Image (cartoon, rainbow, N blue to C red):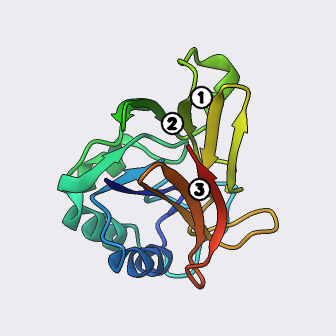
Amino acid sequence: MKLAIISDIHGSIMALELALSRLDAWQPDHYLLLGDLLNHGPRNPVPEGYNPAAVAERLNELAPYIMAVRGNCDSEVDQMLLAFPITAPYNQLLVDGRRWFMSHGHLYRPDEVQLPADSVFLSGHSHVPVLERQGDQILMNPGSICFPRGELPASYGCYEAGVLSVKSCVDGRELLRLAL
């Protein structure tokens, strides 16, 4: 199974199209969206290519393959534009026998959620890519495809055959990698 992990689109159709163009050749089976999909938010500038309606339309094309959670910039009005649910503050799934916990990162933190050993904790929110083992959990933040922070470029995450990675939207190169 191939999973694309995207966070913090913030309404930028340009950023979304760039990330999806990198992912198209890889052909993910599903997309895990970690929130802040349509709105830029009051602390962020208006991003280049800001077009929330176009982002909603493009994501709706992928709706059968999307699982999403709500970010701090997402609202009930956003849900009206989307053909998949985004209002859950978290989601859990089983991937290759391992429990994955998805949240945006503003409500739940790894030390606040009781998960079995070797669980994967996915979050966005900080816009800083992270991929590491912390105690008996695996933490992943794919970064932001729109407003990258820290030293790494705009990025998204991938999972395939027991390996998580964070990849650059700019050139598709692998920035971080962790075998589960």
Instruction: Work out whether mark 3 precedes mark 2 in sequence or the reverse, and give the earlier one.
Output: 2
Q: Position of residue 164 (x, y in %)?
A: 54, 53
**Is residue 89 visible to the viewer in this orientation of the structure?**
no
Three-letter amino acid code at the position of disc 3? Pro
Is residue 68 toward the left or the right of residue 120 in the image? left
As drawn, the label of residue 107 is: 1
Up/down of 38 relative to 109, above or below: below
Q: Residue furthest top?
A: 114
Identify the residue position indicated by label 2 in the image.
103
**Residue picked out by circle 3:** 142
The crowd level at tag 3 (other Cα within 10 Å; few <14, some 14-19, many 20+) is: many
Q: Quadrant of residue 171?
A: bottom right
Are there few (<14), some (14-19), or many (20+) residues within 10 Å of tag 1? few
Secondary structure found at label 2: strand
Seen at 33% across and 77% down, the residue is: 24
Q: What residue is drawn where x is 30% and y is 71%?
A: 27
